[in-house]
Amino acid sequence: MKSFTRNLCLSLVSVAILGGTALASPANLPDFDQVSKDNDRVISKHEAVQANIPAEFFLRADQNHDGVLQKEEYDKLKAEKAPETAAK
Ligand SMILES: [Ca+2]
């Protein structure tokens, strides 16, 4: 029973690490037009949440701090390399 619990914990940790890695790369984000659904040419926080874009990415990408992502800002974010790749 003890080892079962330990294996379960290890599995959960592995899933957390793999999931985190996938999300950590802005290159995996959907295209601008898929996220901005109302044709206002910007991505609102609400649209970002619906597209599962981490708040961390949103805040980093919003370079003029107007609370929405212009296409240029979003494309710049998508062009970033994952932190672990960029570090090497
Ligand atoms: Ca902006």
Image: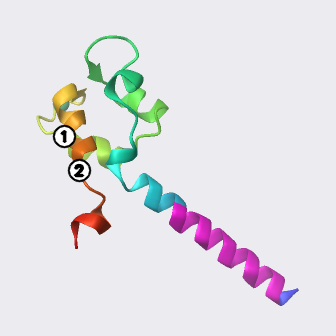
Residue underneath mark 2: 80
Q: Is mark 1 within 8 Å of ligand 1?
A: no
- What span is colored magenta in the figure? 3-18
Q: Magenta segment: does it hold 16?
A: yes
Which residue appears at 11% of the width and 34% of the height?
64
x, y percentage for residue 11? 68, 72
Query: Which quadrant, please, contains the C terminus?
Result: bottom left
Q: From mark 1 to mark 2, how far is it between C-alphas? A: 7 Å
Inspect the image, locate mark 2, and give the three-letter code of the amino acid beneath it: Glu
Q: Are marks 1 and 2 in contact (CB under 8 Å)?
A: yes
Could you say which quadrant of the image residue 4 lies in? Answer: bottom right
Residue underneath mark 1: 76
40 shown above or below 27: above
As drawn, which residue projects farthest toward the right? 1
x, y percentage for residue 55? 36, 45
Q: Residues within 10 Å of mark 1 (few under 14, many from 20)?
A: few
2 shown above or below 88: below
Which residue appears at 23% of the width and 50% of the height?
80
Could you say which quadrant of the image residue 46 lies in? Answer: top left
Q: Secondary structure at mark 1?
A: helix
Inspect the image, locate mark 1, and give the three-letter code of the amino acid beneath it: Lys
As drawn, which residue projects farthest toward the top? 39
Q: Secondary structure at mark 2?
A: loop
